[in-house]
Image (spheres, helix red, strand yellow):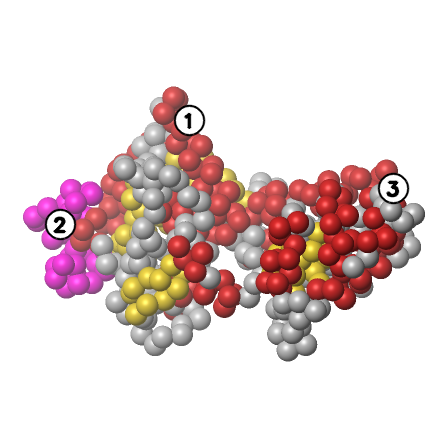
């Protein structure tokens, strides 16, 4: 059986943060009903379209294993259907603007009246406070959560990362909150609200930078490049380029072919435990015992010199050759893999991290599979739903509408085009 088999999710999310959460729950076996505006659907269906007439990759890669129902929640019959969905489901997930559910007539108090066991999970840009009504997108969250101020090089501007830590990162946090609330409900019998502000999620992922902020009170951050360069520290954690920012100094170094390949680089960590092996590999055996190089503390003000020498060696090898040479010596290194290399990686395909998905409108596309593997709950990635594809199915099989009652709901226009549903 699937880990979350039998759990019903009412998915009122759109774009990325919420859909990331509900897709993960769907992969683990939950039955996710994606509620979409009739005739329009999730905004990302038509964003960054690469195949005319087909849902975009933006949508398809965030909505696997879900069922789509078209529903106008402003229509009185639509409100009736939504009420029945709330009665039926275990979790409602939403990333509307603050107050949107209240304006629909479905405040938290009203939802508790309908189904006291329901868990209502929300993504918001900021938590309660002076910014709670502000609109937030991925890069705004990265900036407000401390990621941008600590990313980039010291002499350059703040930089946002290509990883979607604001959107997808928050979705992962929310999924954990939902599963935790479901576990508590088994003992308490009650639903509860789960909130995952994007700013909070980014701050959580930046905890090592808050660690360094506090360490500044005790003196300079010696593992940062600027210490060895004699550059004074300010009153906040600085941008550190490609320094590891941890107890084991590391840098991104050029490899063979870097002149023409923008990803011919490796990450190289000078772990203290394998320092002598590093010295042998790069052809500097005397550094093993040389004064100023033999001990980790002594090396901190010489990191630029050390990594310059290591880079002289890595530039004679491809990034994969660096791995083949260093790994047997337990020297921690890693290639800078491009998105193309990741998509073509057979190992990632064998584990289901990268998958090919068939879609009736766009054909085959490549997507990310479930990043968490459970031995007793294997994941089969199913394509994203077409807009309203499962409306009739959900009305009949999940909510129990039949006969004249079903005809009435369909004819109301609250659930999309009547002809489309009748043809199912």
Q: Where residue 63 appears, x then y in whole percent?
A: 36, 55
The residue under label 2 is: 406
Mark toward the viewer: 1 or 2: 1
Task: Check the picture and name the quadrant holding the C terminus.
Answer: bottom left
Q: Where residue 13 appears, x then y in whole percent?
A: 40, 51
Q: How packed is label 3: few (under 14 Cα within 10 Å), some, or many (20 or more)? A: few
Q: Where residue 255 appears, x then y in whole percent?
A: 67, 67
The residue under label 1 is: 184
25 or 300, nearer to the observer: 300
Dot 1 falls on a residue whose secondary structure is helix
Give left or right: position of 194 versus 12: right
Disc tally is 3
Quadrant housing residue 192: top left
The residue under label 3 is: 219
Highlighted range, magenta? 395-424
| Residue 9 seen in render | no
Dot 2 falls on a residue whose secondary structure is helix
């Amino acid at each position: 059986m699937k880990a979350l088999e039998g759990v019903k999710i009412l998915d009122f999310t759109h774009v990325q943060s919420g859909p990331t959460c509900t897709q993960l729950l769907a992969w683990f076996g939950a039955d996710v009903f994606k509620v979409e505006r009739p005739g329009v659907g999730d905004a990302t269906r038509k964003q960054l379209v690469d195949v005319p007439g087909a849902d975009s990759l933006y949508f398809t890669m965030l909505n696997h294993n879900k069922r789509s129902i078209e529903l106008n929640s402003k229509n009185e019959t639509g409100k009736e259907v939504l009420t029945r969905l709330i009665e039926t489901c275990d979790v409602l997930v939403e990333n509307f603007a603050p107050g949107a559910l209240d304006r629909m007539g479905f405040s938290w108090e009203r939802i508790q009246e309908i189904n006291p066991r329901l868990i209502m999970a929300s993504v918001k840009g900021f938590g309660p406070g002076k910014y709670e009504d502000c609109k937030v997108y991925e890069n705004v969250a990265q900036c407000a959560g401390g990621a941008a101020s600590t990313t980039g090089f010291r002499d350059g501007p703040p930089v946002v990362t290509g990883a979607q830590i604001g959107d997808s990162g928050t979705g992962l946090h929310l999924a954990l909150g939902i599963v935790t609330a479901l576990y508590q409900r088994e003992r308490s019998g009650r639903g509860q609200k789960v909130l995952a502000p994007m700013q909070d999620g980014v701050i959580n992922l930046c905890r090592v930078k808050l660690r360094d902020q506090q360490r500044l009170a005790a003196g300079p951050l010696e593992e940062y490049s600027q210490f060895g360069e004699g550059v004074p520290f300010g009153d906040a954690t600085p941008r550190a380029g490609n320094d590891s920012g941890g107890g084991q100094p590391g840098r991104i170094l050029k490899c063979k072919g870097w002149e023409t390949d923008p990803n011919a680089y490796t990450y190289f960590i000078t772990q203290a435990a394998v320092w002598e092996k590093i010295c042998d590999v790069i052809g500097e055996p005397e550094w093993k015992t040389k004064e100023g190089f033999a001990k980790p503390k002594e090396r901190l003000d010489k990191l630029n010199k050390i990594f310059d020498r290591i880079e002289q060696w890595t530039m004679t090898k491809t990034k994969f050759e660096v791995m083949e040479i260093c790994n047997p010596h337990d020297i921690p290194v890693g290639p800078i893999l491009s998105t193309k290399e990741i998509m073509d990686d057979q190992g990632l395909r064998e584990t289901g991290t990268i998958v090919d998905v068939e879609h009736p409108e766009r054909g085959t596309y490549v997507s990310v599979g479930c990043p968490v593997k459970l031995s007793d709950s294997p994941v089969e990635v199913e394509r994203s739903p077409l807009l309203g594809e499962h409306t009739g199915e959900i009305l009949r099989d999940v909510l129990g509408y039949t006969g004249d009652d079903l005809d009435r709901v369909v004819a109301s226009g609250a659930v999309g085009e009547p002809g489309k549903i009748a043809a199912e």
